[in-house]
Image (cartoon, grey):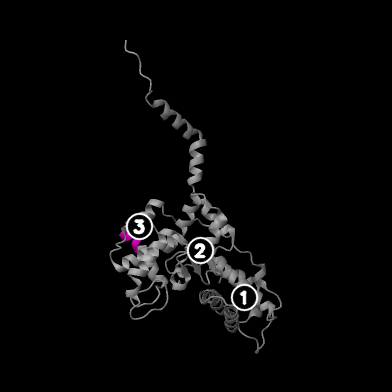
Amino acid sequence: MLSPTMSSPTLSQLRLRYLEHLQSLGRSPRTCESYGERLQSFIVWSELRGVSYPAQVSLTVLEGYQRYLGQYRKADGHVLSTNSQRDRLNSLKAWFRWLLQRHIILYSPAEALVLPKEVRRLPMGVLSDSETEQVMSAIDCEQPLGLRNRAILETFWSSGIRRKELSLLRLEDVDLSRGALRVHQGKGGKDRVVPLGERAVSWIQRYLKEVRPSLAVRFDSGYLFLTLHGNNLKRATLTEIVGRSIRETAKLKKAGACHLFRHSMATQMLENGADTRHIQAILGHEKLDTTQIYTRVAIGHLQKVHAQTHPASRKSVAKSLSAEPSDKTEDPQ
């Protein structure tokens, strides 16, 4: 292990420099915050063990931290998920790679870390077509905020955009004549245009005509969906609105909120024959693998094939047909 000198920057100092570097690359504040939290966790753990400089970090140290993550329990008593552990270790790898590029370290011990296998989980649940309609129809659209909320849910369902993306939609981002939404700086800092169905367009038009003007009387922030004070709806507020609509208003026992509509849209469209690559473009997924997970939830087509080809299903169909009364009538004796 190399010995640090008095002039060597500490891990804490280098963390700040790295975050400044990420900001200079145009990474979102949330991304920088996430990296900062993950690296800070490692630094605190390291300093408690007398490791404060990058030259003191060896593969043995990093493996010790990896074991710590595997045993760590959150405030609710649950362990960190495998993917959460991977995220923290990948952040370390990226940081040490940056330190190596700037000749602050001679080699990156993090490259030798063997990460736990990534777990690809299915979406927790999706809404069926009828359940989605149940949520929509349960909203009281006679009330101004009810009409606004209906327009919000219709937008989520039609476009599949993320909660943050909807929160930041501005008036100029909506092209109702073309039926399209422009998403600025979505996940990964990328812009995209997504389709908006006629039904969602009609609800947005009604909201813009009947509700938004009154919300923007004193102050108009320029965002599409407004609070009573004319500001955009924050992510936590959107979660509350959508979650309440699903579980309290529509009385559905479904977990999730905004992302549930994103999952449902993708699954429902795949079951109706949409191409996976089209869904990928709408959702803004960088990798097709991320989108293909929805094919494991969309089982409508598989159910049809199963009913047509599985021996038990075929026998039950044949049996039901044989049990049906014949159209022929016997001649009377």
- Kindly identify the residue that appears in the image at 41 percent across and 54 percent down: 127
Find the magenta span and give its range. 244-250
Q: Is residue 170 visible?
A: no
Q: Amino acid at mark 3?
A: Val
SS majority, magenta = helix
Residue 222, magenta (yes or no): no
x, y percent for residue 48: 54, 79
Dot 2 falls on a residue whose secondary structure is strand
Sequence order check: which comes first, mark 3 or mark 1?
Answer: 1
User: Closer to the camera, 177 or 284?
Assistant: 177
Counting the numbered discs, the total is 3
Pointer 3 residue:
135
Q: Is residue 103 above or below residue 6?
A: above
Dot 1 falls on a residue whose secondary structure is helix
Sequence order check: which comes first, mark 2 or mark 1?
Answer: 1
Pointer 1 residue:
95
| Disc ID at residue 209 | none
Q: Is residue 102 above or below residue 290?
A: below
Left or right, 174 with respect to 105, comes to left
- Tell which residue pokes out farthest to the left in this image: 142
x, y percent for residue 191: 55, 70
Dot 3 falls on a residue whose secondary structure is helix
Give the mark toward the camera: 2 or 1.
2
Pointer 2 residue:
194
How far apart are the two marked residues, 3 and 2, measured between alpha carbons?
A: 23 Å
